Each structure stands twice: as structure tokens, then as C-alpha cells.
């Protein structure tokens, strides 16, 4: 039975608030004033080290995703009516999904997903050696050591977000709000499931680390979420993120001069023809002609993008909302093993999304300028890890002496 009172409540680790309205407003305030959220303004989406203020940062992207989450949430509530306990939980439902979107990138490293690969590459080459230097592992602890190594070598922005919220920033958010950003249900030290295994999509990436496993276990227990499953509103945050990406990367690429308005039109038309996709093709041709006929050259792309984005976003929001309702029990249980936007592979909306994703992969993400920055970012991050690695190699005794501003033999660590 679907009853959102089991999922949306006031549980939190410290200083719980009895009033639900005050509880989720408290979450909003804590999130919007968090230093880790403000730091997203210096992290770019695709174009790292970008100085052009018009190009999206992780912060501006998160704001766009939050708006999409509000739209999806409100649409779902309209379709649900006053059922499932949502008549009294509507505001909390919307706010939780919106704030999950504000937080969804909070654990991302600089230079995006390429940095995750770089960090894991460095750790896989160095972590074992450092551990063996520091600790004489007994036979009975070998299994635990290997568990920690898997945890250390599986850095992921989603798992880091949980660590930031629970440990590093200690935001003391409600369990409902924390669960909403637990995008993947597998611990970093657990093995990745094979394709076709139970809940393989929900467990395809690390969702949390060993250091947060006890807190995560308590949250799952309090919100009646089975192991391996997901919080229902997380599906909304994920869909909002997917929708927000569609036009954003293409718009930023035009701002950067990587592609032009004419390129965008030609590339979309060509990709639609390759995939035999007609919905997006008709949309693009309609608004391309309208922009050409009604605007001067400097403003044509703006009109084209505004009309295309508005129409496509509205259609996709309705599409994912219908999928949410059609699969409501599984989503409520957290066992729906798909992203909402990827569920119906035969849908015209899914195909339209695939067209735009293909264009971004072929003509933006693999552009020479971005690949060059990725190579630079690899060297920057590797050098930082090499430079600070002495801190990983000193003993606990020396580390705590440093925290007390005492001197130790390793002057570089000091």
C-alpha cells in the first residue's frame, strides 16, 4: 500500500523537529546556506576552467534541475489527487524533490566525471602500498583490508554527496531529505552487479562509503526502504537532471563557439534521420523556420532554443510523470529498476532524448578543446595527490600531533 507518511516525516539524527512544515523548511535553509553548495559556483558542467559567466556551473545547473523537479513534482501531485497521504504532504513532497536537486552534484569533484576516473586511477596504484606501509595486517583482517581498498578505489560524486551531508558538513538534514539524494543503493565496497542481476540499475554505481554505512542503514530502517532499493522522490531528481542536460550542453557549446546555430539545426536533423526520429525533427524544423522568419541573426538561436526547450521540457515532464504514476507501487517501494526517462525505449520522447545525447557525445564532449582540458585536469589532480600523499603515509600518532599544531619528523606533512 502506498502511504507517503512512511517516507516523508521528521526523523533526523539530532534535534528533531515535531512540525513537518518547519522540518522541511529547516532542511531548505540548511541546504541553501551550506558552503558546499556555494562551492559549486566554481565547478563547471562540461567546460572546465571556463571564465565565461554565461556558461553553466554546477550551481546554475543545480538551480535548473531544482526547477525541473518542482515542475515534475507538481505534475505528479495533480495526477495523484488527494490519494496516498499526499493531500497533506504536497508541500513537503515538492520541497524534498527540489532540494534533492540542489544537492545532487554537491559531492562532484572538479573537472567532472573525468576526475572520478583520475582519482580512482591514482588510488588503485597507490592505496594498497600505503596501507601495507602503515599497517601490519593480520590474516584475520585481510578481508576487511580488501573491503577498505575497494571503498578507497571507488570514488564517486554520488557517494561523496552523502559523505558531505552526513560527515563533512554535518548538515543534520532530515532522513527524508538525505534519502532523496541516495541515488544508487550500493556501497562503494560492494561488488558491482552483473547486467541482469536484481536491481542492477539501482546498484550500478557506488551510493555511499563504508564510513557512512551505519547512518545509511538507520535511514533505510526508519523510512522502510529495503536494502538495494531507492527512495521514491530520488526518481524525480534523476529525471529532472536528465531533462535539464538536454539543451544545456548544446547552448553552452554555442556560447563557447564550438558549434553554431546552423550546426545545431543540421546536426539534430541529421541525427533524427539516422535514428528515424520524427517528433524532435518536426519540432526543430518548426522553430528553426520561426526563428529565421521572426528574428534578426544575433537573436535567432535564442528564440529557437527558448521555444524548443519550453515545448520539449513540458512534454518530457508529462511523460516522466505518467511513468511515475503507472509504476507507482514499484517506485514507492524503491524497486523500479530504471530511470524514468529511459524506461520506455520505444517512446518518441526517449528517442528525442537519445538524439540530443548522441549529438553531445559526438560533437561536444569529444571536442578537442574539452579533451585538452581533461588531459590538463588529469595532470593537476595527479600532481595534487602526489604532493599531499605524505599525509596519507604518516602514522595516526603523527597525524594527531599535526592537528594539535605539534611538529613531527616529516616536514612536508607539517
Image (cartoon, helix red, strand yellow):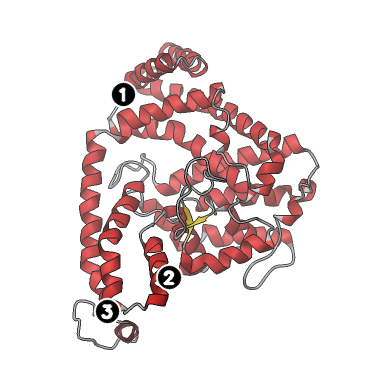
Residue located at (54% from left, 47% from top)? 202
Residue 204 vs residue 25, the one in the foreground: 204
Give the foreground label among 1 and 2. 2
Q: Residues within 10 Å of mark 2 (few under 14, many from 20)?
A: few
Q: Quadrant location of residue 53?
A: top left
Q: Distance between the residues labelled 3 and 1?
A: 53 Å
Residue 6 vs residue 203, the one in the foreground: 203
Residue 2 vs residue 95, the one in the foreground: 2
Numbered disc 1: secondary structure: loop
Disc 3 or 2, which lies upstream in sequence?
2
Give the foreground label among 3 and 1. 3
Percent position of residue 11, x then y: 68, 65
* Residue at which label 1 appears: 260
Disc 3 or 1, which lies upstream in sequence?
1
The circle drawn on residue 394 is 3
Disc 1 or 2, which lies upstream in sequence?
2
Numbered disc 2: secondary structure: helix
Q: Residues within 10 Å of mark 3 (few under 14, many from 20)?
A: some
Q: Is residue 54 left or right of residue 159?
A: left
Numbered disc 3: secondary structure: loop
Percent position of residue 10, x then y: 70, 63
* Residue at which label 2 appears: 144
Percent position of residue 287, x then y: 47, 16
Camera sees residue 281? yes
Q: Distance between the residues labelled 3 and 2?
A: 21 Å
Amino acid at each position: 500500500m502506498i502511504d507517503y507518511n512512511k517516507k516523508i516525516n521528521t526523523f533526523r539524527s539530532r534535534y528533531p523537529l515535531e512540525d513537518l512544515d518547519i522540518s522541511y523548511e529547516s532542511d531548505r535553509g540548511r541546504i541553501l546556506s551550506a558552503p558546499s553548495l556555494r562551492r559549486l559556483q566554481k565547478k563547471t558542467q562540461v567546460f572546465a576552467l571556463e571564465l565565461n559567466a554565461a556558461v553553466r556551473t554546477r550551481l546554475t545547473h543545480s538551480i535548473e534541475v531544482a526547477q525541473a523537479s518542482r515542475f515534475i513534482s507538481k505534475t505528479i501531485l495533480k495526477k495523484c489527487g488527494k490519494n496516498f497521504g499526499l493531500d497533506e504532504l504536497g508541500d513537503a513532497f515538492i520541497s524534498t524533490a527540489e532540494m534533492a536537486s540542489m544537492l545532487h552534484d554537491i559531492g562532484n569533484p572538479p573537472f567532472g566525471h573525468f576526475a572520478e576516473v583520475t582519482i580512482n586511477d591514482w588510488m588503485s596504484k597507490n592505496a594498497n602500498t600505503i596501507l601495507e606501509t602503515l599497517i601490519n595486517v593480520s590474516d584475520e583482517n585481510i578481508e576487511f583490508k580488501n573491503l577498505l581498498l575497494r571503498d578507497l578505489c571507488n570514488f564517486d560524486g554520488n557517494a561523496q554527496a552523502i559523505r558531505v551531508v552526513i560527515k563533512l558538513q554535518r548538515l543534520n538534514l532530515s532522513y527524508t531529505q538525505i534519502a532523496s539524494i541516495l541515488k544508487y543503493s550500493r556501497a562503494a565496497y560492494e561488488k558491482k552487479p552483473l547486467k541482469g542481476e536484481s536491481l542492477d540499475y539501482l546498484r550500478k554505481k557506488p551510493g555511499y562509503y563504508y564510513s557512512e554505512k551505519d547512518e545509511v542503514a538507520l535511514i533505510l530502517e526508519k523510512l522502510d526502504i529495503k536494502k538495494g532499493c531507492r527512495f521514491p522522490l530520488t526518481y524525480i531528481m534523476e529525471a529532472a537532471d536528465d531533462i535539464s542536460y538536454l539543451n544545456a550542453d548544446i547552448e553552452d557549446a554555442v556560447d563557447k563557439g564550438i558549434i553554431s546555430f546552423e550546426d545545431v539545426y543540421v546536426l539534430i536533423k541529421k541525427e533524427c534521420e539516422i535514428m528515424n526520429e520524427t517528433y524532435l525533427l518536426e519540432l526543430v524544423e518548426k522553430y528553426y523556420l520561426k526563428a529565421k522568419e521572426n528574428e534578426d541573426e544575433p537573436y535567432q538561436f535564442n528564440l529557437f532554443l527558448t521555444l524548443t526547450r519550453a515545448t520539449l521540457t513540458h512534454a518530457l515532464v508529462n511523460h516522466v510523470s505518467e511513468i511515475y504514476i503507472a509504476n507507482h507501487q514499484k517506485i514507492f517501494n524503491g524497486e523500479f529498476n530504471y530511470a524514468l526517462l529511459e524506461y520506455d525505449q520505444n517512446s518518441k520522447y526517449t528517442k528525442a532524448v537519445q538524439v540530443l545525447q548522441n549529438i553531445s557525445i559526438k560533437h561536444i564532449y569529444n571536442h578537442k578543446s574539452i579533451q585538452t582540458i581533461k588531459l590538463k585536469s588529469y595532470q593537476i589532480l595527479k600532481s595534487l595527490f602526489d604532493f599531499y600523499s605524505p599525509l596519507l603515509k604518516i602514522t595516526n600518532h603523527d597525524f594527531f600531533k599535526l592537528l594539535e599544531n605539534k611538529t613531527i619528523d616529516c616536514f612536508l606533512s607539517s
